[in-house]
Amino acid sequence: MDGILLVDKPAEWTSMDVCAHLRGVLHEKHIGHTGTLDPNATGLLVVLTGKGTKAAKYAENDTKEYIARLRLGTVTDTQDIWGTVLEHNGQTRTREQLEAVLEAFRGPIMQLPPMYSAIKIRGKKLYEIARRGGDVPRDPRPVTIHRLTVTDQDEAGDWGLEIACSKGTYIRTLCADIGAALGCGGCMSALRRVRAGRFTIEQAHTLEEIRSDPEKFILPLELIVPGGENDG
């Protein structure tokens, strides 16, 4: 069964959990995705099935869009609220202060990959090293933040951010870096992917929906392969 499935990934599932689950649903061993979502993140996961897994290279550089929440005054080892708290100072900042530092994070920037990531250095995944209490030098990587805007502040004091960015951007690292720039520290408290390339969250389906009639939701590979229908 070759094609594309647009999944609304639930929280507490890894991206590979979703793929493994769909292997059983579709009775198809060749299943992959075009961009990982952290386990506690939700939203659009573009899954490729059958021969479609070979088309992943065509979606590697797609722009991704997210809705995130930033919690100021808290620093954790994973750069999100699910990690171990390293500092909690209770500080916050005004919207004007937050807006003032965001310009430095728009456009091409250099970002240091977090230790809690699947990047391999000398054959070891960083998160495996981090879980053993280790730390290794990493080189900053170029990423591009195409759009970064503040939307609101909720009752808990967390700020809403809308972000459009290039491949390889870590949103939790972006949140931590914004907090550091504000002098109070910060971490990500929620993340939802709402767009990947041409696909949007409105087109995605829950795992429950897909289980009910999997073939109904499979889209043609031509939607991402160059020269395909409405390509670009």
Image: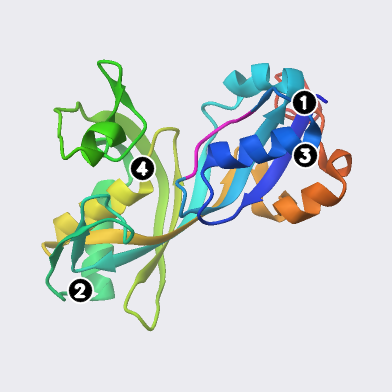
Which residue position holds label 3? 25
Which residue position holds label 2? 93
Q: Is 142 situated left or right of 46 in this image?
A: left
Percent across and percent down for residue 13 are 54, 49
Q: Earlier in the sequence, mark 3 or mark 2?
A: 3
The residue type indicated by label 2 comes to: Arg
What colour scheme has been applied to the protein in the rendered image? rainbow
Mark 2, Cα crowd under 10 Å, few <14 / some 14-19 / many 20+, is some
Q: Are marks 1 and 4 in contact (CB under 8 Å)?
A: no
Q: Is 11 situated left or right of 175 in this image?
A: right
Magenta-tinted stretch: 32-37
The residues tagged by marks 1 and 3 sit, at their Cα atoms, a distance apart of 19 Å
Asked if residue 205 shows in the view, the reply is: no
Closer to viewer: mark 1 or mark 3: 3
Q: Residue 206's image quarter?
A: bottom right
The residues tagged by marks 4 and 2 sit, at their Cα atoms, a distance apart of 23 Å
The residue type indicated by label 1 comes to: Leu
Q: Earlier in the sequence, mark 1 or mark 2?
A: 2
Percent across and percent down for residue 89 are 12, 72
Closer to viewer: mark 3 or mark 2: 3
Which residue position holds label 1? 221
The residue type indicated by label 3 comes to: Val
The residues tagged by marks 1 and 2 sit, at their Cα atoms, a distance apart of 46 Å
